[in-house]
Amino acid sequence: MPMNRSKTAGLGAKRLGSVLATLTLLSGCMAGIAPPSMLRMHDKAAPNSVAAQGALAPQAAVSSPLIADLLARQTVLPASGAYAQVADAVVANSAGAAEAELRVARLKAEAQSKNWLPQIGPQVTLTSLGGLAAGLLVEQALFDNGRRRAEREFAAADVEVAAVGLSTAMNQRVFDGLSYYVNAERARAQAGVAEQAAGRLQAFVAIMQKRVAGGISDGSEQQVLNQQLAEMQATVAADRQAEATAMAELAALAGRPMQGVTGLTDLPDLAAVAPEPLSVVKARGEGARAIAQAKMQISGLRPGLSATAGLGGGGINPGVRLNGGFLNPGTKDNIAALQQTGDVVDRQTAEAAETANRRLVALAAQKANLASRQAQGAEVLRQTDANLTLFTEQYKVGRRTLLELVGQYDAFARLQRDQASLRYDMALIDLEIARDRGVLVEGARL
């Protein structure tokens, strides 16, 4: 009797070995003998390499109006100019993390697109004699309450969310690069005003030194002028440091120095550019994914039916399997709760649209306020310039002191410096609006 058992166990082990060998051959036929791509490094891949353009291009597994909308978006940046040079540099130096996430999502969607096919797997059972009986089990769903369709919908929605993430990431990257550039230009312009003022104050200090040497003025007046000159020189140094810092950050983002790029680029009227904000598009994609997930959960709470066929040493053994969840007192309420997902998604999408619109309105109002301040500041600057001319004439005839003239000029220089900054503040607001609407990068480049 022990010999029979050992012989039976030996036969079971041999069958198991043959079945596993067969499964190995089948997996080789289906997937090939190459290792998975996640375990291989691409020949040209590098930590800072950018993914190939066309990551948003439609594929067979997922055809989405959402992705088509992202592809059709046109950039508001002119084809040439400083903005275009900065944008091209930072896009070319992208590490491509968002592109990689999109490729992963598309591979998953491609896999789920085949989930209607029969599933094949090993089947190992313990016989009454203590041996192992091995074979293949083929299972085909007959009725699954729409679970497999929901799985395909979930994977497709996941691709859409990843596509929006790619567009958001690239628009944010271009915005970051352009923000560094605009801030550097602002610091350069302010430094130019401050340097001119420092040179004029240096001339006033030289005059005061002569007055002190001749006994016309005392040393306290010279100290006041020296302090004003030192403050203006410190302002120049701070502006130059801000310019150097912004350009260094831009060079790190672009992967190369961006010296020689100067000037601002006028953008078209963004009020006429009306693509949906990316935050709303993302909310819609996440909503579709949440609905698909709810469908999968609902189907899991209901029983399903599948046909099976066991392939073993005894031939084909057909059968029917009941799977899925079992009915319990809380199933009805769980299903009812999951069925409310669509309403929740609609409300969340509406809230996202409201939030995005409020932000765009606030940015537009902020820009209008800056434009008003610029116009008012220009008038104040004109009047201050006229007063400075009057002070200069009065100083020449002895009706104004040198300190009064220097104080008027210092106020004029600081007002001129602040006025120069407003233009760049408005440029940054334009870039923010373009980023939120997803029109800083051409959709076809993604």
Image (cartoon, rainbow, N blue to C red):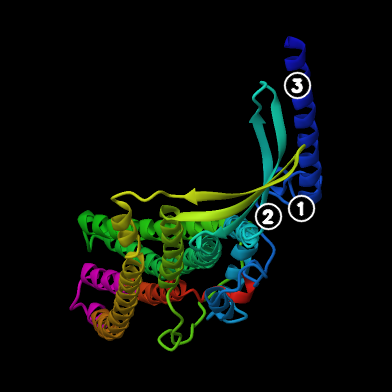
Between circles 2 and 3, the one closer to the viewer is 3
Q: Earlier in the sequence, mark 2 or mark 3?
A: 3
Q: Earlier in the sequence, mark 3 or mark 1?
A: 3
Q: Which residue is mark 2?
A: 49
Q: Is residue 161 visible?
A: yes
Tell me, for residue 8, which label it has, or none: 3
Residue 439 x/y as whole percent: 51, 76
Q: Nearer the viewer, residue 446 or 327?
A: 327
From the viewer's perspective, tell me whether residue 187 is left or right of residue 390. Answer: right
- Kind of residue indicated by mark 1: Lys
- Kind of residue indicated by mark 2: Ser
Disc 2 residue crowd, few under 14, some 14–19, many 20+, Cα 10 Å: some
Q: Earlier in the sequence, mark 2 or mark 1?
A: 1
Residue 19 x/y as whole percent: 77, 36
Secondary element under disc 3, as helix, strand or loop, is helix
Q: Nearer the viewer, residue 383 or 223?
A: 383
Which residues, given as a range, are shown in magenta? Answer: 393-416
Residue at position x 33%, y 77% from top?
A: 357
Disc 3 residue crowd, few under 14, some 14–19, many 20+, Cα 10 Å: some
Disc 1 residue crowd, few under 14, some 14–19, many 20+, Cα 10 Å: few
From the viewer's perspective, tell me whether residue 363 is left or right of residue 3. Answer: left
Q: Main secondary structure of the magenta part?
A: helix
Specify whether residue 401 is painted magenta. yes
